[in-house]
Amino acid sequence: MAERSDVYFIDGVRTPFGRASDKGIYAHTRADDLAVKATIGVMARNDTVPGDRIDDVAIAATSQTGDQGLTLGRSVAILAGLPQTVPGFAIDRMCAGAMTSVTTMAASIGVGMYDLALAGGVEHMGRHPIGSNADPNPRFVAEKMVDPAALNMGVTAERLFDRFPQLTKERSDRFGMRSQHLAQAAYDAGKIQPDLVPVAVKDADGAWGLATEDEGRRSETTMADLAGLKTPFRPHGRVTAGTSSPLTDGATMSLLAGASAVRELELAPKMTLVSFAFAGVQPEVMGIGPIPSTQRALDRAGLSIADIGLFELNEAFAVQVLSFLDHFGIVDDDPRVNQWGGAIALGHPLAASGVRLMIQLAAQFAERPDVRYGLTAMCVGLGQGGSVIWENPHYDGKKKKKR
């Protein structure tokens, strides 16, 4: 009889993230090939795990069409060279796609149905812009269920400024600048690169190159630069390109395991799953979604926000993260929050981003044995939030010494 099990994040890798444009590094690269590269990468780093022991492969994409269609989990598993006995499926929760891939596989491991699983996501926004193949039901508008503008994420971000007057443009700009500076500092210190899988890419002329770094970083950003940017979502608005995540291409993949597989294969977990939750909010202010999902995850774990020692919050928009921080009484520049920068600098390939948060948290856990719990959280289009709480296996109960 199957036994319930703890769930472990064994490892995670991702491709470098590229700008979603006809001049971006992945303009001539297929979306499924990005997911294949991430899958091969995580299996190669964990070569004691036999491919035929993978119980399932879950891969998320928001626009499931073209080279992001055809049941990605299964097609990518085949293309990555996994045995054909390994099944797979596709999943969609927009921005929280990869996060949902992880929690779905984790739930299957937790109830003893699976021992090992792969979970990740991919988004090629250059080929498949958000909503490009969508046909929203006219009842949304006709029956006044959803404001039509709620399908524009930038408009929903502007509405957070309206709802919370303390969230000023100056605070938002400063947070956007912080993200760029912290991301570059992390690159300079070699923090990000170990978990990137290089990708061979071809340009418009057919010349080959190698993608090894995130393409969208702007490390020289200043407050003066941000002050002068246009506000594309509202005349005289407060959301700019400098305080929004850029349109991005990229893929992520993680390896999850249950306790018996960890023992048998002598795996070294990077994180232990504590709890997770998803929540719905008004689509018109989707950015506040991580607030109720985080509270639910904390309640289910018997924890408070004060127990969280590290936060990886997806920076869809700076104002969205600030609304979360204000709600939980956390200052804008708290060193626990996105200490290696976030999506404003690194990019946000929608359904791939959840695992990017987990990869960074896992790497930070290894450096911080004084931290027991960490949080990965994000807002989700159409009014949702997703949150996962993790425990640090390196925790030693000793407080970090102040310098």
Image (cartoon, rainbow, N blue to C red):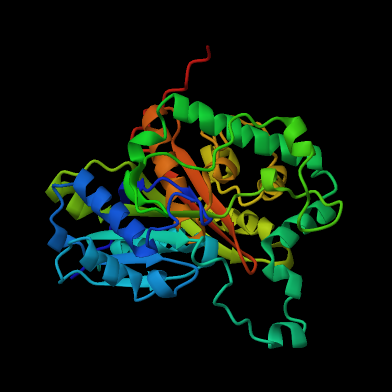
Residue 363 shown left or right of residue 11 in the figure? right
Judging depth in this view, the residue of 345 and 320 nearest the camera is 345
Q: Is residue 348 above or below residue 306?
A: below
Count every numbered label the image shows and give the total. Answer: 0
Judging depth in this view, the residue of 116 and 273 nearest the camera is 116
Residue 73 shown left or right of residue 140 in the figure? left
Judging depth in this view, the residue of 71 and 221 nearest the camera is 221
Judging depth in this view, the residue of 38 and 203 nearest the camera is 203
Instruction: Check the picture and name the quadrant holding the N terminus.
Output: bottom left
Task: Please state the horizontal and vertical placement of residue 266, each as a whole percent of the image.
Answer: 15, 43
- At x 53%, y 52%, the residue is 348
Q: Is residue 6 visible?
A: no
Task: Please state the horizontal and vertical placement of residue 131, each as a whole percent of the image.
Answer: 58, 71
Task: Please state the horizontal and vertical placement of residue 207, each as a whole percent of the image.
Answer: 34, 48
- At x 63%, y 31%, the residue is 334
Residue 49 shown left or right of residue 222 in the figure? left
Q: Quadrant location of residue 213?
A: top left
Q: Residue furthest top?
A: 403
Q: Quadrant location of residue 250?
A: bottom left
Task: Please state the horizontal and vertical placement of residue 171, each as a whole percent of the image.
Answer: 76, 38
Q: Is residue 157 visible?
A: yes
- At x 63%, y 81%, the residue is 136
